[in-house]
Image (cartoon, helix red, strand yellow):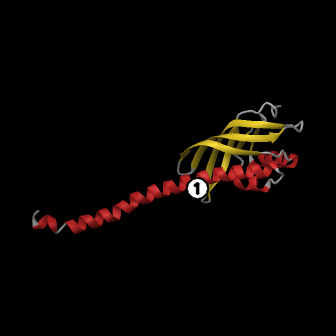
Amino acid sequence: MTTRYCNRLPLIGAALAMAFPLFGSSALAAMTDKQAALAANTEFYAALNKMFIGESAPIEAVWSHGDDVLYMGPGGETHRGWSDIVQDWQRHGAVKLGGHVENTGVESIIGRDLAVVTDTEVGENTNANGVVAQVKIRATNVFRKEAGHWKMVVHHTDLLPYLAK
């Protein structure tokens, strides 16, 4: 190399060194968003299991409290807006269905402010007749980033025949 180009190598190296952290930072930020959104999904299922034993406060904490939220659960009803949804979760909590569900087969699409997570809810609950019933339904969960935290804005599941009205 000529001296003219060799003298520029430190400048080029410094420019590249400054540029690559920018690319790495955005990739890291996306990873952080994905991890945070998936953690919010995991937190939802922990809260759902608490609701089965009568504790509705954790499920209330994972949801956005906006008027635009939507819940289409295994009973076949559609609830729109936080004031409608919270009443439904409190009603479910008061019943104390018991049981436990886990989410399996998790897939996700994570954006800057919205995340879509699909999974299968597998477990068991007690039905209205007091009989333990198996649960295996598909679910779609949508989260929105609000004040830096991923909050649930949509929960949609297959129907459970013993809950459908």
The image quarter containing residue 141 is top right
List the single residue furthest toward the right: 129
Query: Looking at the image, which is closer to me, 3 or 145?
Result: 3
Given the image, on which type of amino acid does mark 1 rest? Ala
* Residue occupying the point 56% across, 44% down: 108
Q: Is residue 36 above or below residue 10?
A: above
* Residue occupying the point 68% across, 53% down: 43
* Residue occupying the point 71% across, 42% down: 70
Position of 143 with respect to 133 (left or right) is left
* Residue occupying the point 14% across, 64% down: 5
The image quarter containing residue 156 is top right
Quadrant placement of the N terminus: bottom left
Q: Position of residue 34 (x, y in %)?
A: 54, 52
Secondary structure under tag 1 reads helix
Q: Position of residue 139 (x, y in %)?
A: 67, 39
Q: Is residue 164 above or below residue 36?
A: above
- Mark 1: give few (<14), some (14-19) or many (20+) Cα within 10 Å: some
> Circle 1 is placed at which residue position?
36
Quadrant placement of the C terminus: top right
Position of 33 with respect to 23 (left or right) is right
Q: Position of residue 161 (x, y in %)?
A: 79, 30
Q: How many marks?
A: 1
- Residue 163 appears in the figure: yes
- Residue 64 appears in the figure: no
Q: Position of residue 146 (x, y in %)?
A: 63, 56
